[in-house]
Image (spheres, coloured by chain):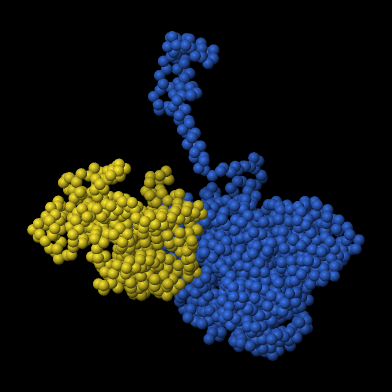
């Protein structure tokens, strides 16, 4: 306003009436002396006039105009959500500075130490704890995904009694009342169904409960139970020990139906050491060799150098034949056990090489080989494997035995279910507590149990969701997520770590140990006290507090226990092995059904986790469903196509399920993945896939023959992220054998060369500062998909749902491509490329081309190159022409066709993404709206974060300081990220190794991601 | 109009039925805009408007939900949207070719159909321009494509062929509209002069910009028309060349092809002539214009359809040859996949419609057969739509990395928007027929024998003491 010409103050005309506002004003106006005028001018300087006049016309118009336009603008905005800043900042919390806390997760009997990222008290991302032997800084896909379970909007929020909302105090009162009846009878009629646990506190409290109620019965059940391994060890050694295989030292490994790289216990540990044993730095290195015998095509089978597909039922016979050969030809000392296998023949149809050559290879690597039995195989197979490992001198070398965390756990979980159901049938159960688990859904005969459970006088179910079992129990009590509660866990090699909560229970849930504490009448049953109490017994003495704090800080409480060297009990093994006959030969009318632990759903507990639902199965690439796996030959014989509904029948049991044809699956065998078809999992998990548990029995929990399959003539839509499985002879996931690699170490780059043409113009970027790059070692990658979930968690990648995946709109920035290839290196023409193929996997995200096709074609310059070589996306600039995605040869760009965060999987109940799910978001990464293209950024938020840190500390960035979410998660250490300009950095070294190649290098895109080709180590004697 | 002599002198046929007079032309053309619309017009108009309504609804839904209401996916980021865009742009080409190029080459037979064709161009380009606008994910930011000074100080990316498209098609639309309007002025003045009610007089009077048919007006008019024709002519080549750059400059096998610019231009002319033929034959029947749009026109147009159809067929063959000859496995695969892969049905539809059906026109009897011409023009329209679909979708659906291969399924919204764009086109076209002289009267008169300065020297016609063709 000061720019306006000033108002001239003229003073009142003498005859004008005097208008005054105060007596002072009146006096001033009457005084016309020059001094008074000067005073007045000083009082009302130029321009101030506007303000002195409350209703100046121009001022009014200006203000009104501004007000109207601002009000209009306001109307265009989205409603304002108010945030509440910390009035008093909690100690140790700096807003926007992430903190990490050490904790631990139980992953199928192994503890994986973790560091969990917390934003202002909100855990968002799980990373491995480098100091923990079960992790070494790495994680697996379920650990990565489990953070989303914490923010599951469908978790139950308060205890209920037959559907009516109660408080936790009500439950405690009711339980105490129920227990009073048992104090007098020593716990007769008190049954507790628990899941196998590796928590020392759990074991301690269970023993305390048993001491208080000597007649109480504990039943242990888990659908993905590994009790066969336990029973096998008991058979072989007379004690429950667990084998820990050092795959890095085992030059030859034979997997007996074991999926040790994806679903069997110790995945992180196994993957790490297996990848170490496979590592090839130069042609002089010899990768280890892996033979896999299995029925389903597992991820481990995909990593095999030789794979024998055999129905699970016949694997025992194969193993016996192998043992017989080792004894007869190679004079392996099996002691008494030799008698049990003498003269054993391999199942018909198995190439004699699979016995003779494998035996010779094992015998040639005494003390440096390993046999691994899968949890699916019965105890005698485990026992025989133990005997063979002893005989081959592997025990104590490559296979070490550690005491189990819970020595008193039952050895046969199926029998435990049976005993519970017997007790229920006999009406002997007055009080039933189900701590975790979901037996009505997943126990053999669970449906039959359900009515019995409903009849029990006092029944309570502790679980995260009001699920199938909760429905039948009187009480339902919310169970706390592992990130919410105190606990502890002992890893396979005996390292105990404290499970430290990162957040108060969101829905006032309780943990198993807290309920056990209540049962045991412990002085305090707060988880914190219970865990400390256990820790106190382990660390007696006055250094307790220091040790406790150290354990919390570092994430490990005790170091590994020394392995034990148990003696074999040959007679037991002989007894168990004898008299086991395979039944009638398998055929299309006598099919074997095999139950498999699902890589994503596990036993069904992760059904409501949308990341896992949408994650393609590592082998089949199916999302949002499971299906019955048939081999191509069996499917053809039965007249089944992939996607047909089939009915599997045996006696009065039958199951309707979609069929899928999986190349490389064993003939006459059908694999049924567990954990699907939940009906009360929540709005994400309900109704996806097929519940196969009704076919499972206590007698044969893992595989059973005698089934027939008939096509029902209807189709079921299955959504896959990849439906073409051949590489079409293109140099994409490049691999070769050791022999050919030695002949021509740079074979990969020759197959996928980068053209050496002179550029038309000078490159705009010289990349003199940082030059970010990545290497992906296909030789280490097992295809486990942990990286995909890690990327999803880190980068707020939306989930789109089954129908949209079927349309080809999944959003994963990083995907793991899986191809089936000829096992003999003969290309797609080989007939075994479909019947019995090898598998090739390739993680593929944006490769950050230096000469990026996407950048040229964007009309609005929304995707541009940074001076550090990142191909960047400016979401705010993107208008969504999708031209960049069309022009991307790698097809790694993902488009928000709809507003996935709102129109996504939670839609049926909420119009918007539930508030609580938003808590899982990484605040450092923009959440993308519809109509915007997105893709891998090399985790630019991490790069910037560390750069700022280094700058603040006034130092150079160190190698390895910045790592992407995928690289950090990768248990095989296949992904390396860093600065290519930094001398001696790991990534720059790896990018120069002879196995390097640039994917589709011939287009001239000059990707920053370098692939290192895979080297297979086939046994030359197996060829032909 | 310059007039180089009676057409019989240079061995051509009459371009209008002998006996046609200036008055007859004026009557025939003007009465369409003056008399009540025939029933057929109303039926077609209501149908077309309904489809336009569907278009509006479908676009509204599209804006409300997002591009996901279409079937586009990854890897097929473009499908019907850009197919429709290229198809409509291509259709537009015939108009410019007929009006500008044939004008410069003094092909006088164009006069009966050029107005028509030009109108078609403009309406087709309107339909075409719809698609780049609505296919983006965030329509409310579509203006980022224009070089508007802004507070973010960001310009569009001038390296992007999509931006070239914006300029090329924008220029094309502007020049075509100007060219069309300038050509209309004398005829609008005729309508003004015939007006019997004040509204018509006002509107046509305004639009005819004070045309008095003076010598000076004619001189300026003809110069302007010539200049605009000269400006339009390179656009015939440039617009579709630039559109083809969207594909040709990419790295996708099946797109990355140097043959695309001429191939696209030939295809555009091909499809445009087919669309002109379709419309012309309908108008000829509905408005009984047999005297003005003669069999000669039909035959000449069919010859061009034959010629361009054959060029397009050659281009298809050459693409295959080059794919084989290049030795590039990705390129080879894409072409084999087109012909024998999951989209073989689309490919062979295209070949049948575009390459095989025009070959019938080698026979004079067939190319002068009106029903057959209509049928083949429809075939060509269909075939050319499939050509764009084949190029866009079959290239994208299986490119370099087999793991990403997919298939495109259209949704009802895809179909609604395509049908709706046809509705919009016909709505505009029917309005044009109803309110604007659909045949360039002034130009057509110039090809009458009476228009010749030497008319009386060869006095074998009626004695019309006519002025050179001018508005009456």
Q: Position of residue B48 (x, y in %)?
A: 40, 56
- State the residue in front, A5 or B240: B240
Q: How many marks?
A: 0
Is B414 situated left or right of A526 in this image?
left
Q: Is residue A310 visible?
A: no
- State the residue in front, B137 or B430: B430
Relative height, residue A277 to residue B220 (above, below): below
Is A980 situated left or right of A653 in this image?
left
Give the image quarter of residue B292.
bottom left
Which residue is at 45% across, 21% downward? A45
- State the residue in front, A755 or A821: A821
- The colour of chain A is blue
Q: Residue furthest right?
A: A184
Q: Position of residue B257 (x, y in %)?
A: 35, 67
Question: Which chain does yellow denote in the image?
Answer: B
Q: Position of residue B403 (x, y in %)?
A: 50, 69
Q: Is residue B83 visible?
A: yes
Which residue is at 63% across, 55% downward? A909
């Amino acid at each position: 306003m000061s720019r306006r010409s000033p108002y001239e103050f003229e003073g009142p005309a003498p005859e004008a009436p005097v208008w005054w506002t105060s007596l002072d004003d009146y006096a001033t106006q009457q005084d016309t002396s020059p001094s008074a005028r000067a005073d007045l001018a000083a009082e009302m300087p130029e321009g101030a006039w506007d303000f002195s006049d409350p209703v100046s016309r121009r001022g009014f118009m200006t203000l009104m105009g501004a007000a109207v336009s601002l009000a209009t603008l306001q109307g265009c905005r989205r409603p304002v959500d108010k945030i509440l800043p910390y009035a008093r900042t909690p100690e140790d919390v700096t807003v926007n500075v992430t903190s990490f806390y050490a904790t631990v997760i139980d992953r199928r009997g192994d503890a994986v130490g973790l560091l969990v990222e917390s934003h202002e008290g909100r855990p968002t991302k799980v990373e491995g704890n480098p100091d923990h032997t079960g992790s070494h800084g790495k994680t697996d896909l379920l650990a990565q995904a489990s953070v989303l379970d914490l923010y599951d909007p469908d978790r139950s929020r308060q205890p209920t009694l037959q559907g009516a909302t109660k408080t936790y105090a009500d439950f405690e009162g009711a339980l105490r009342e129920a227990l009073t009846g048992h104090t007098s009878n020593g716990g007769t009629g008190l049954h507790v169904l628990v899941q196998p646990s590796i928590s020392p506190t759990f074991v301690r409290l269970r023993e305390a409960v048993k001491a208080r109620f000597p007649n109480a019965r504990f039943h242990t059940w888990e659908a993905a139970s590994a009790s066969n391994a336990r029973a096998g060890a008991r058979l072989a050694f007379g004690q429950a020990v667990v084998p820990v295989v050092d795959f890095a030292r085992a030059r030859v490994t034979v997997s007996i139906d074991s999926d040790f790289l994806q679903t069997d216990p110790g995945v992180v540990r196994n993957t790490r050491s297996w990848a170490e044993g496979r590592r090839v730095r130069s042609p002089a290195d010899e990768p280890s060799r892996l033979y896999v015998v299995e029925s389903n095509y597992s991820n481990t089978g995909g990593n095999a150098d030789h794979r024998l597909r055999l129905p699970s039922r016949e694997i025992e016979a194969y193993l016996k034949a192998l043992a017989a050969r080792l004894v007869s030809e190679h004079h392996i000392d099996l002691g008494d056990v030799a008698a049990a296998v003498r003269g054993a023949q391999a199942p018909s149809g198995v190439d004699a090489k699979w016995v003779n050559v494998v035996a010779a290879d094992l015998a040639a690597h005494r003390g440096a080989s390993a046999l691994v039995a899968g949890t699916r195989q019965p105890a005698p197979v485990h026992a025989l494997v133990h005997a063979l490992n002893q005989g081959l001198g592997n025990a104590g070398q490559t296979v070490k035995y550690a005491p189990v965390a819970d020595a008193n756990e039952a050895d046969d979980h199926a029998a435990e279910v049976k005993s519970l159901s017997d007790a229920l049938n006999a009406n002997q159960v007055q009080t039933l507590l189900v701590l975790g688990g979901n037996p009505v859904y997943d126990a053999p005969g669970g449906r039959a149990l359900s009515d019995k459970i409903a009849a029990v006088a006092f029944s309570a179910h502790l679980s995260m969701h009001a699920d199938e079992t909760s429905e039948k129990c009187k009480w339902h009590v919310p169970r706390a997520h592992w990130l919410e509660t105190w606990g502890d866990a002992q890893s396979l090699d005996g390292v105990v770590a404290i499970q430290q909560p990162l957040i108060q229970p969101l829905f006032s849930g309780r943990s198993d140990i807290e309920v056990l504490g209540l049962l045991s009448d412990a002085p305090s049953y707060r988880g914190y006290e219970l865990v400390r109490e256990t820790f106190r017994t382990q660390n007696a003495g006055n250094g307790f507090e220091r040790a406790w704090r150290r354990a919390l800080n570092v994430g490990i409480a005790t170091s590994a226990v020394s392995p034990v060297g148990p003696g074999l009990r040959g007679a037991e093994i002989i007894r168990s092995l004898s008299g086991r006959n395979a039944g009638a030969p398998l055929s299309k009318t006598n099919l074997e059904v095999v139950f498999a632990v699902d890589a994503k759903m596990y036993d069904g507990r992760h059904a409501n986790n949308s990341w896992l639902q949408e994650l393609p199965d590592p082998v089949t690439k199916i999302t949002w469903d499971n299906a019955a796996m048939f081999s191509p030959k069996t499917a053809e014989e039965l007249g089944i196509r992939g996607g047909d509904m089939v009915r599997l029948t045996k006696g009065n049991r039958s199951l309707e399920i979609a069929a899928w044809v999986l190349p490389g699956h064993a003939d006459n065998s059908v694999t049924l993945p567990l954990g699907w078809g939940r009906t009360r999992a929540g709005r994400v998990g309900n109704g996806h896939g097929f519940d196969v548990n009704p076919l499972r029995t206590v007698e044969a929990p893992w595989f059973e023959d005698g089934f027939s399959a008939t096509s029902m003539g209807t189709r079921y839509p299955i959504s896959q992220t990849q439906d073409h499985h051949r590489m079409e002879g293109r140099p994409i996931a490049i691999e070769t054998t050791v022999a050919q690699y030695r002949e021509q170490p740079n074979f990969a780059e020759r197959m996928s060369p980068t053209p050496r043409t002179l550029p038309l113009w000078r490159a705009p970027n010289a990349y003199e500062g940082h030059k970010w790059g990545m290497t992906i070692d296909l030789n280490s990658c097992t295809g486990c998909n942990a990286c995909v979930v890690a990327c999803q968690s880190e980068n707020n990648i939306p989930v789109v749902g089954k129908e949209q995946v079927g349309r080809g709109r999944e959003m994963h920035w990083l995907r793991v491509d899986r191809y089936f290839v000829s096992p003999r290196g003969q290309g797609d023409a080989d007939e075994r490329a479909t019947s019995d193929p090898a598998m090739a996997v390739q993680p593929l995200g944006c490769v950050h081309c230096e000469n990026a096709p996407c950048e040229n074609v964007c009309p609005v310059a929304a995707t541009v190159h940074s001076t550090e070589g990142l191909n960047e996306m400016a979401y705010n600039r993107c208008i969504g022409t999708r031209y960049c995605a069309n022009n991307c040869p790698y097809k790694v760009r993902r488009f928000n066709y709809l507003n996935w965060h709102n129109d996504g999987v939670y839609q049926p109940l909420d119009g918007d993404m539930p508030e609580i799910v938003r808590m899982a978001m990484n605040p450092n990464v923009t959440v993308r709206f519809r109509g915007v293209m997105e893709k891998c950024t090399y985790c630019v938020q991490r790069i910037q974060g560390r750069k700022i840190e280094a700058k603040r500390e006034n130092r150079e960035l160190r190698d390895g300081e910045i790592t992407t979410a995928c690289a950090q998660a990768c248990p095989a250490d296949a992904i390396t990220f860093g600065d290519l300009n930094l001398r001696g950095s790991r990534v720059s070294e790896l990018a120069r190794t002879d196995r390097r190649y640039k994917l589709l290098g011939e287009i001239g895109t000059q990707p920053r991601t370098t692939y290192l080709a895979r080297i297979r180590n086939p046994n030359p004697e197996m060829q032909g | 109009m310059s007039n180089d002599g009676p057409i019989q002198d240079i061995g051509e046929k009459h371009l209008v039925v002998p006996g046609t007079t200036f008055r007859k032309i004026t009557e025939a053309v003007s009465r369409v805009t003056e008399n009540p619309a025939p029933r057929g017009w109303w039926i077609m108009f209501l149908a077309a408007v309904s489809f336009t309504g569907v278009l509006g609804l479908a676009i509204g839904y599209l804006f409300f939900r997002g591009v996901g209401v279409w079937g586009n996916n990854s890897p097929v980021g473009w499908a019907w949207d850009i197919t429709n865009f290229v198809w409509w742009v291509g259709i537009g080409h015939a108009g410019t070719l007929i009006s500008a190029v044939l004008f410069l080459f003094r092909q006088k037979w164009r006069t009966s159909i050029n107005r028509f064709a030009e109108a078609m161009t403009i309406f087709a380009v309107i339909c075409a321009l719809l698609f780049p606008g609505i296919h983006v994910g965030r329509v409310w930011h579509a203006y980022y494509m224009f070089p508007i000074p802004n507070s973010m100080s960001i310009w569009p990316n001038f390296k992007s062929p999509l931006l070239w498209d914006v300029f090329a098609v924008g220029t094309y639309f502007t020049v075509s509209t100007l060219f069309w309007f300038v050509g209309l002025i004398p005829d609008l003045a005729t309508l003004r002069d015939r007006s019997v009610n004040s509204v018509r007089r006002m509107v046509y009077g305004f639009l005819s910009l004070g045309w008095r048919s003076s010598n000076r007006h004619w001189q300026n008019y003809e110069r302007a028309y010539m200049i605009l024709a000269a400006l339009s002519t390179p656009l015939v080549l440039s617009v579709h060349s630039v559109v083809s750059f969207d594909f040709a400059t990419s790295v996708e096998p099946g797109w990355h092809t140097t043959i695309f610019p001429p191939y696209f231009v030939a295809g555009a002319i091909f499809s445009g002539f087919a669309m002109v033929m379709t419309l012309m034959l309908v108008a000829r029947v509905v408005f009984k214009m047999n005297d003005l749009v003669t069999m000669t026109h039909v035959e000449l147009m069919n010859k061009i359809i034959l010629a361009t159809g054959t060029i397009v067929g050659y281009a298809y063959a050459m693409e295959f040859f080059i794919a084989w000859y290049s030795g590039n496995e990705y390129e080879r695969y894409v072409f084999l996949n087109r012909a024998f892969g999951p989209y073989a049905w689309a490919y062979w539809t295209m070949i049948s419609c575009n390459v095989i059906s025009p070959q019938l026109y080698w026979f004079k009897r067939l190319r002068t057969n009106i029903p057959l011409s209509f049928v083949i023009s429809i075939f060509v329209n269909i075939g050319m739509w499939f050509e764009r679909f084949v190029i866009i979708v079959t290239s994208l659906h299986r490119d370099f990395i087999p793991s990403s291969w997919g298939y495109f399924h259209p949704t009802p919204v895809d179909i609604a928007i395509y049908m709706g764009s046809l509705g919009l086109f016909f709505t505009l076209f029917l309005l044009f027929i109803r309110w604007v002289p659909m045949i360039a009267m002034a130009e057509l008169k110039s090809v009458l024998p009476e228009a010749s300065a030497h008319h009386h020297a060869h006095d074998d016609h009626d004695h019309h003491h006519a002025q050179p063709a001018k508005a009456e």
